[in-house]
Amino acid sequence: MLSFLDVTYLEENASLPILEALCQSIQHAPQQPAGICVYAHDLPQVVKDLHNLTLAFVTVVNFPNGNASNAQLLSQIKAALKNGATEIDALIPFQEFLHDRDFEEVGHFIETCRLELPNHVKLKIILETGEINNIEDIYRLSMIACEKGADFLKTSTGKTKSGATLEATQAMMQAIHDYYKKSNKKVGIKISGGVRTPEEAQAYIDQTKSILGESWMSPSLFRIGASKLFAVLCKPSN
């Protein structure tokens, strides 16, 4: 399970000692996680502390409110790349979408992100499914993200009242499945927002196997974004 984890520390005013301690925990973890996810201004520190590992260096853009202007978005992407990001988790303008349900505008946002990134940098699109309650909308947004070049679909920021749910991920995975059937391209899934225990994580692993199959059971296609879960998995068993 550790190998699927994007260890997350997303605090605007991150504590350097906490950040350094987290990097040390990753260095000494019983199994290397898939990645570490921090704000762009914290990337240089984690890249320095973890340069000897092959994990992904992940950051976020248009986060956590989803209301950055186009100029701000491009600036954030530029900073992320400069600071060493190998993966970018981009939050769709979900508040605007909830207001006008403009699917085309969401597609344009995703397209803009993809065009700004080198091919080797993975793009993970955050749908904030806890705020978008309509399952049909979640499916349609998921399909748009796949079609516009997302490498992963991600449930949520973890900053809203409701995070990941099995109902939302079912719709997202069904879109990934349907897109794969017509394009032969595999898009990954990242579960984020409220996954704190191995039992909760296992439910999503089982769901992914059921809908998408065993071939998705790789860090290149399946991730769990969490902070507390990492500590639980690293705790020595009695």
Image (cartoon, rainbow, N blue to C red):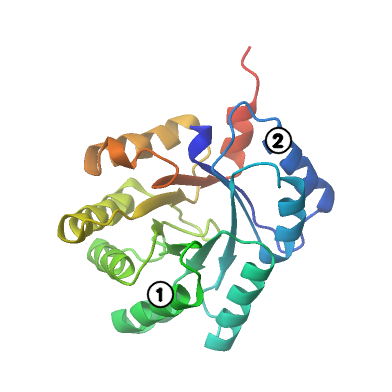
Question: Looking at the figure, which quarter contains the C terminus?
Answer: top right
Residue 66: percent from the left, percent from the top?
A: 51, 74
Occupied quadrant, residue 185: bottom left
Q: Tell me which residue sits at (77%, 62%) in the image.
A: 13
Please say if 112 is above or below 44: below
Q: Tell me which residue sits at (62%, 26%) in the image.
A: 30
CB within 8 Å, label 2 to label 1: no
Q: Which residue is mark 1?
A: 110
Residue 37: percent from the left, percent from the top?
A: 61, 53
Q: Secondary structure at mark 1?
A: helix
- Tally of marks: 2
Occupied quadrant, residue 107: bottom left
Q: Which residue is mark 2?
A: 27
Mark 2 or mark 1: whose residue is earlier in sequence: 2
Residue 165: percent from the left, percent from the top?
A: 37, 49
Q: Tell me which residue sits at (63%, 68%) in the image.
A: 80
Residue type beneath disc 2: Gln
Task: Judge left or right: residue 172 versus residue 224.
Answer: left
Q: Tell me which residue sits at (70%, 42%) in the image.
A: 52
Residue type beneath disc 1: Ile
- Outermost residue toward the right? 17
Please say if 160 is above or below 198: below
Give the Cα distance between marks 2 and 1. Answer: 34 Å
- Outermost residue toward the top? 238
Count residues near mark 2 (Cα–Cα under 10 Å), then give few for <14, some for 14-19, many for 20+: some
